[in-house]
Amino acid sequence: MIKLFQPWWKKKQRPASVVLAPDNIPKHVAIIMDGNGRWARRLGLPRIVGHRTGMKAVKRATIAADELGISVLTLYAFSTENWKRPKDEVDFLMSLPQEFLAIELDELIEKNVRVRMMGYTDMLPPHTIAAMEEATERTKHNTGLILNFALNYGGRREIAESVKAVARLVQNGELSVEDITPDSIDSHLLSAGLPEPDLLIRTGGELRLSNFMLWQTAYSELWFTDVYWPEFKQEHLIEAVAEYQRRTRRYGGLS
């Protein structure tokens, strides 16, 4: 039972019978996929089992997003800080994109999904890069849902790299300081060309952004759930979108 005055981000999930307004579906949903390790620990299993089971949730979320008419689904798969984890866990995580795409790529192509990567390749192993490049190449002409994997991604680094790019334009005389605008930064972000996230979801019960899309989420609606990522289902995405539709986005204004 939901307690009186319980914070909205701790409310239990409503059933998937929620009716959504088709004209107010978020164009871009970004998800911090958290809780794989804790889900596995709760069941007395190794952390890597949680990560592998989380791949099934990736497929469920992709199907659900496509069915809801969401245009972009960004999944935070591996951060620039995740390299601090034990090597065996990192090595396993680096194998998952290849494993997932080997299983699912043909179906993604059939469903008209376009795969995209948002991150830095400088520390990624060759097999991970090759898997992402193949998926990107084979789906580049697809016009449906954009499945955007944030892999070796960090929001602070992204902003810093964008500022460097703008500074080089100024240094080369291609841009004046007075002409620098937020759009100048936007155009050099890894997400350039994508709409900003309308809705940011974090699973696993933590209430922070963890260096994810810091610039782009300035006006995103945030939705937190205690559900661990391996347990995330269509009904949870529907409830997140329903909560999104119950809110009024004012962007600093009054209406």
Image (tube, rainbow, N blue to C red):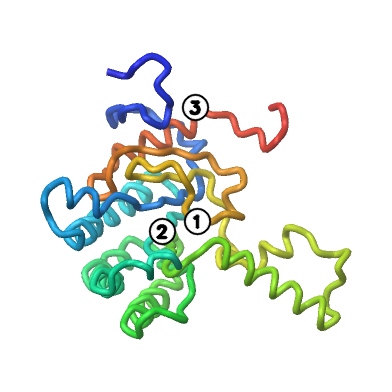
- The residue under label 3 is 246
Give the crowd class for mark 1: few <14, some 14-19, many >=20 residues within 10 Å.
many
Residue 102 located left or right of residue 252: left
Kindly indicate whether the residue at mark 1 contacts the one at mark 2 (C-beta within 8 angstroms).
yes
Residue 42 on image: x %, y %: 16, 46
Q: Quadrant of residue 170?
A: bottom right
Q: Quadrant where the N terminus lies?
A: top left
Mark 2 or 3: in front is 2
Q: Which residue is mark 1?
A: 212
Badge 3 local density, few (<14 within 10 Å), some, or many (20+)? few
Tell me what residue is drawn at x 35 percent, y 85 percent. 126
User: Hey, what amino acid is under mark 1?
Assistant: Phe
Q: Is residue 141 above or below residue 37?
A: below
Q: Which mark is residue 76?
A: 2
Local crowd at mark 2 within 10 Å, few (<14), some, or many (≥20)?
Answer: many
Precedes in sequence: disc 2 or disc 3: 2
Q: Earlier in the sequence, mark 2 or mark 1?
A: 2
Q: Distance between the Cα atoms at labels 2 and 1?
A: 8 Å
Q: Determine the residue positioned at 37% across, 28% down.
A: 19
Instruction: Residue 98: tell me if it is visible.
Output: no
- Tell me the kind of residue under disc 2: Tyr
215 vs 174, nearest the viewer? 215
Looking at the image, the residue that sits furthest to the top is 4
- Quadrant where the C terminus sits is top right
User: What residue appears at the point 78 percent right and 60 percent down from the top-left corner?
Assistant: 181
Front residue of this view, candidates 93 and 83: 83
